[in-house]
Image (cartoon, rainbow, N blue to C red):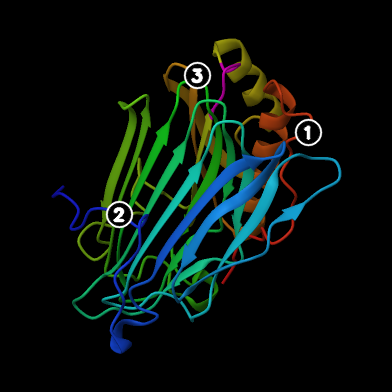
Amino acid sequence: MSSFPHPFLELEGGASPLSVRDVGRSGRLDLRFSVRRGRTVLSHQYHEVPFKVSRVHYSPASPLARVIVMHSTAGLFGGDRLEARIHVDAGAQAVVTSQSATKVHPSGISPACQSLRISVETGGELHYYVDPVIPFANSRLQQEIRIELGSGARFYYWDGLMAGRVRSGESWSFAEMRSQTAVLVNAELAYLDRFELRPADQSPTRRWAMGRYSYMASAFAYDPSIDEGRLDSIRSAIASPGPDFVYGLDLPFDRLMVGRFLADNGVRVRLARDRYQRAVLSHLSGQSLSRPGHGAEAVGST
């Protein structure tokens, strides 16, 4: 797989203005969570169209600052380029969710590109749970995700991919999707996931690929309490694989749990997500006050 086409922009310290024709197509987002007077606040925020960010919300039962990231356009189109950065300082605790699934429209020969960089310092905590990507027929998407964690950070993550507009008969009808996700702990590469899908060249429905499933989700948890014993407990809490969904969990790096879930419809993948969240929060230490709320987290079922 060839290298990805662009690095992350350095957003801090200012950003160059966009031309009118690029407004809504070349958007940047930069969020930083810090501690002020014992409370987590959004200490820095910069966003361009199509990004929008909700006001910070606090639950009486939790110290986490909660933010919803939204898009003000219909989705991604060929030639779009979106870049996002989220940084969590030591001591800060935050939840970031999405408003809805990311829709990728027909792209011609130019792909839509999106990149995300997450940094969580030692002593920081981030829950990042977002809705899936839905690639429409004849769409092209390239995405890159880079997660940088301090050795004492806490991090919990979920994202997903649908085969397309399944209910419209567009399963695996997109032209191309390329994705790379890297997780680094103290600047050491702990996990790397790369895949490239071109359904017209090689069907994802083959055995040892997606098979009959049309929904895929990836999950990460980096937590000081994770070990083989905790992993077995979480597996038991999620339940054995069956017709609802199948999954795998493993520890490719010290204290880093990686999971992949497959489901055959949106209801099942939401069930998998709920079971995963409950299992993680029940079996990892320090989470009694850190359960993310379920608002604005519905899985797309287009």
Indicate which disc, 3 or 1, sits on the residue closer to the N terminus: 3
Q: Amino acid at mark 2?
A: Glu
Q: Position of residue 240 (x, y in %)?
A: 64, 29
Q: Nearer the viewer, mark 3 or mark 1?
A: 1
| Residue 289 marker | 1
**Dot 1 or dot 2, earlier in sequence:** 2
Mark 1 vs 2: CB contact within 8 A: no
Q: Which residues are magenta?
A: 222-226
- Mark 2 vs mark 3, foreground winner is 2
The residue indicated by pointer 3 is 255
Majority secondary structure in the magenta region: loop
Element type where label 1 sits in the image:
loop
In terms of depth relative to the viewer, which is nearer, 242 or 20?
Answer: 20
The span from disc 2 to disc 3 (Cα, nearest Å) is: 30 Å
At 28% from the left and 47% from the top, the residue drawn is: 195
The reply to whether residue 244 is in sight is no
- Magenta span contains residue 242: no
Single out the mark in the foreground, 1 or 2. Answer: 2
Of callouts 2 and 3, which one flags the residue occurring earlier in the amino acid sequence?
Answer: 2
Q: Which residue position holds label 2?
A: 10
Q: Residue furthest left?
A: 2
In terms of depth relative to the viewer, which is nearer, 282 or 73?
73
Dots 2, 3 in contact, CB < 8 A: no
